[in-house]
């Protein structure tokens, strides 16, 4: 796989990311990612956005979309990969429900924000997340059999989960951290792009 | 159960024996057969009827994990174990006739998260489903038994997510669903399925969560898990079958009489589902006198052996009783106090243990102000929301915290009614008899502070309630979540007038590391900080900071669990509140928690 494509693809997923953040999800080393993004900025494919952060430019977005179809044609035609992705969608539906249950609780029939004062409630959800993660690991493994770099998401998810299990609950869904939900969302975006699928909502 | 279980790995020299029959003749160590099989063996050794079972030892698990394959001889011994179950039940694994179905459970010496859950109904197949349908005369039940097996096998062995097995479909459809969801297939024979389930139990020993749990708790990684394989019994087989639940004492009142329900010709799920109305135990006594007598005897034995009231699930098959599960019974506040007092009186437990079995919240709910008479239909309900803090309070509905404070200072009884409450309203909440809000749930500010202050609170009554109630005389019932028109009669129980609570208070005072005094017990000239006048003194989150450098305190949230904990953390000499028993219990439980003693819980045995 072309390294420049990977760097720009990582930036597309991050929307607004540093070389280190891009490197972490696409499996480049940080120095290489920094060099590539600097190059991209120099020839107009990326724009600098704040300190050491980059964004894709609009033309680069379009070029990237066209590249996916060419670079991932085999993967898109692979039945086993598509079946694994369909299973991923099912786990995804469960995760969405779980995150909803994490962020809101039901009180007298209506949902209100979870203020995390009920420790037992939170512990049950983190336990559910641990169980869901077993299914997630399985399906990520099935997809990584066809595209090895995807396994990095399993590692990042495990990292976030274990931090949450150890009491740092912001690692469940905080959007400013590579929390479980953040990594999941990025993995989903990655898969949608390379497989040419659309989000259902 | 109460007897300690040893957790050292058994001897390493191995004689090639990987399974043990559980027949009550001996009680092998939990390290060899796991906690669940140990409990089954113990029940059998007490002469109690449990469905026949055998266990694959932790040694087999260790051998499997070391080599990655079933150790030589294990599969044959599992076959022998199944043959033994067939002989003891009179049913054949895989049919014909009423089939032998088994449950497969993991059983580590210590229970831990991430281990494999129980698989039920293993042994069902297209063939045995037909036999079961014929034997029970209930094709729907047989189909559902089959479907449930697929469901459990898929989610537990194959880690399927979102696989749904349609109740109206059959195994061909379910096979396709399993394949699509996991890429795995259902093994063809019931024996292969059993072996696959056993392997899944072994492998769950190394599941991520189990490994982490062991790491955090210093549990050796080489203990391994046992696998318990137990015959399933059917409560829906014939007119002499049924299922039910028995409490060894009444869990609502604590009265020393068995209390339970029985559902003839039904399976356990039917009782829980609420689809059928169970009958009182007296009906079981008429129809199944032998099983009924055995059940009462079993309840007595289990209560004595476990030192606590038991909640027992049982099934009767062909007139014979089987115990499925027993655990310490959950109980209502009144029953908790009654049972603790009774069990100390008859010498079953120590006063220290009695204190561990009554929570501060249970006593608070017993001592909360209550309506003297239940409101009749003529009593107008002005508003309804979620009961967030129990008790009854009444007074004039006031919609502003400053006004509440002024009117209370003049001796009026007020109820604070707000759209929501915020920290700016707390001075009004402290003087109010109750609080009512339009929006918010059980974790809203009003609910949290209401509970900390012991203030009856009804939250989330809906828009417009503030205007509707303003200026009216109202009575707030904080358990039901209702606001009644008018000032209803309220009485407040006194902890000193209930001999059981007085006795518990005496024990708790002896055991508590924190002195808790009534206002009239405070030594003259003591310097007692009144938290009602300190910013944050009513807030469970802030009370630790508020108490820094204080010698003694009263008011605010000092009598709440958080207040007591903070007082102990800050080394206060004493606190002043009323009633004293909830605070004393909170102190005793906190001290036990710090000393690393778990609260008194008996693990479920199933």
Image: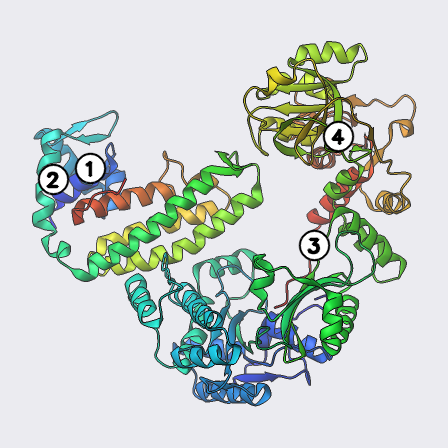
On the same chain, marks 1 and 2? The answer is yes
- Counting other residues with Cα less than 10 Å from the Cα at mark 2, is it few (<14), some (14-19), or many (20 or more)? some
Which residue corresponds to the image point at 83% horizontal and 46% vertical from the top-left? B511
Q: Position of residue B187 (x, y in %)?
A: 35, 77
Q: Name the chain under label 2.
A: A
Give the numbered dot on residue A64: 2
* For residue B398, above or below residue B279: above
Give the numbered dot on residue B149: none
According to the picture, the residue beneath numbered tag 4 turns out to be B392
Which element is circle 4 on? Answer: strand
What is the quadrant of the C terminus of chain B in the image?
Answer: bottom right
* Mark 3–mark 4 CB contact (< 8 Å): no
Please tell me whether mark 4 or mark 1 is closer to you in this view.
Answer: 4
On the same chain, marks 3 and 4? The answer is yes
- Residue toward you, B367 or A193: B367
Which element is circle 3 on? Answer: loop
């Amino acid at each position: 796989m072309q390294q420049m494509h990977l760097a720009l693809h990582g930036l597309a997923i991050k929307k607004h990311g540093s070389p280190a953040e891009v490197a972490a999800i696409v499996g480049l080393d940080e120095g290489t990612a920094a060099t590539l993004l600097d190059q991209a900025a120099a020839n107009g494919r990326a724009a600098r956005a704040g300190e050491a952060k980059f964004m894709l430019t609009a033309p680069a977005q379009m070029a990237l979309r066209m590249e996916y179809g060419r670079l991932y044609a085999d993967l898109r035609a692979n039945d086993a990969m598509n079946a694994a992705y369909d299973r991923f969608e099912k786990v995804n539906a469960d995760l969405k429900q779980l995150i909803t249950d994490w962020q809101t609780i039901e009180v007298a029939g209506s949902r209100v924000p979870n203020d995390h004062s009920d420790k037992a409630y939170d512990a049950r959800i983190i336990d559910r997340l641990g169980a869901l993660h077993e299914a997630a690991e399985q399906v990520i493994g099935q997809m990584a059999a066809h595209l090895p770099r995807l396994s990095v998401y399993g590692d990042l998810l495990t990292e976030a989960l274990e931090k949450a299990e150890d009491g740092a609950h912001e690692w469940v869904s905080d959007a400013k951290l590579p929390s479980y939900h953040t990594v999941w969302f990025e993995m989903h975006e990655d898969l949608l792009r390379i497989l040419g699928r659309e989000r259902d909502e | 159960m109460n007897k300690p279980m040893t957790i050292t790995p058994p001897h390493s020299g191995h004689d090639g024996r990987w399974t043990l029959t559980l027949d009550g003749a001996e009680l092998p160590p939990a390290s060899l057969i796991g906690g669940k099989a140990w409990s089954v063996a113990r029940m059998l050794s007490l002469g109690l009827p449990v469905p026949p079972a055998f266990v694959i030892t932790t040694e087999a698990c260790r051998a499997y994990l070391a080599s990655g394959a079933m150790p030589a001889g294990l599969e044959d011994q599992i076959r022998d174990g199944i043959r033994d179950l067939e002989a003891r039940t009179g049913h054949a694994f895989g049919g014909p006739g009423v089939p032998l179905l088994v449950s497969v459970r993991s059983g580590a010496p210590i229970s831990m998260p991430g281990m494999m859950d129980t698989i039920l109904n293993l042994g069902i197949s297209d063939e045995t489903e037909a036999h079961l349908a014929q034997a029970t005369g209930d094709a729907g039940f047989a189909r559902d038994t089959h479907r449930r097996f697929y469901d459990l096998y898929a989610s537990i062995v194959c880690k399927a997510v979102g696989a749904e097995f349609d109740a109206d479909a059959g195994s061909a459809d379910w096979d396709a669903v399993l394949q699509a969801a996991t890429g795995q297939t259902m093994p063809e024979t019931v024996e292969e399925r059993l072996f696959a389930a056993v392997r899944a139990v072994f492998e769950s020993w190394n599941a991520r969560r189990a490994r982490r749990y062991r790491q955090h708790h210093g549990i050796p990684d080489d203990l391994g898990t046992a696998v318990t394989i137990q015959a399933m019994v059917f409560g829906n087989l014939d007119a002499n079958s049924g299922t039910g639940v028995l409490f060894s004492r009444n869990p609502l009142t604590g009265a020393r009489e068995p209390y339970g329900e029985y559902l003839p010709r039904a399976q356990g799920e039917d009782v829980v589902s609420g689809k059928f109305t169970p009958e009182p135990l007296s009906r079981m006594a008429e129809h199944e006198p032998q099983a009924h007598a055995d059940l009462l005897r079993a309840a007595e034995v289990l209560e004595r052996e476990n030192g606590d009231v038991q909640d027992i699930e049982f099934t009767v098959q062909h007139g014979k009783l089987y115990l499925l599960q027993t655990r310490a019974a959950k109980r209502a506040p009144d029953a908790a106090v009654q049972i603790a007092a009774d069990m100390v009186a008859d010498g079953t437990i120590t006063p220290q243990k009695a204190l561990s079995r009554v929570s501060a919240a249970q006593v608070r709910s017993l001592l909360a102000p209550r309506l003297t008479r239940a409101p009749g239909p003529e009593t107008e309900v002005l508003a309804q929301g979620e009961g967030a803090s129990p008790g009854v309070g009444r007074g004039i509905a006031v919609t502003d915290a400053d006004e509440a404070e002024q009117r209370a200072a003049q001796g009026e009884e007020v109820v604070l009614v707000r759209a929501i409450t915020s920290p700016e309203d707390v001075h009004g909440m402290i003087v109010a008899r109750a609080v009512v809000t339009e929006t918010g749930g059980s974790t809203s500010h009003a609910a949290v502070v209401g509970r900390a202050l012991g203030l009856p609170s009804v939250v989330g009554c809906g828009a417009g309630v503030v205007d509707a109630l303003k200026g009216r005389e109202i009575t707030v019932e904080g358990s039901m979540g209702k606001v009644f028109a008018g000032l209803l009669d309220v009485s407040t129980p006194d902890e000193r007038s209930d001999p059981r609570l007085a006795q518990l208070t005496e024990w708790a005072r002896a055991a508590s590391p924190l002195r808790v005094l009534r206002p009239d017990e405070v030594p003259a000239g003591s310097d007692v900080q009144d938290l009602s006048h300190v910013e944050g003194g009513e807030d469970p989150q802030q009370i630790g900071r508020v108490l820094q450098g204080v010698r003694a305190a009263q008011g605010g949230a000092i009598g709440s669990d958080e207040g007591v904990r903070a007082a102990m953390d800050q080394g206060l000499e004493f606190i002043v509140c009323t009633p004293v028993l909830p605070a004393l219990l909170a102190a005793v439980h906190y001290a036990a928690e710090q000393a690393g003693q778990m609260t008194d819980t008996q693990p479920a045995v199933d």
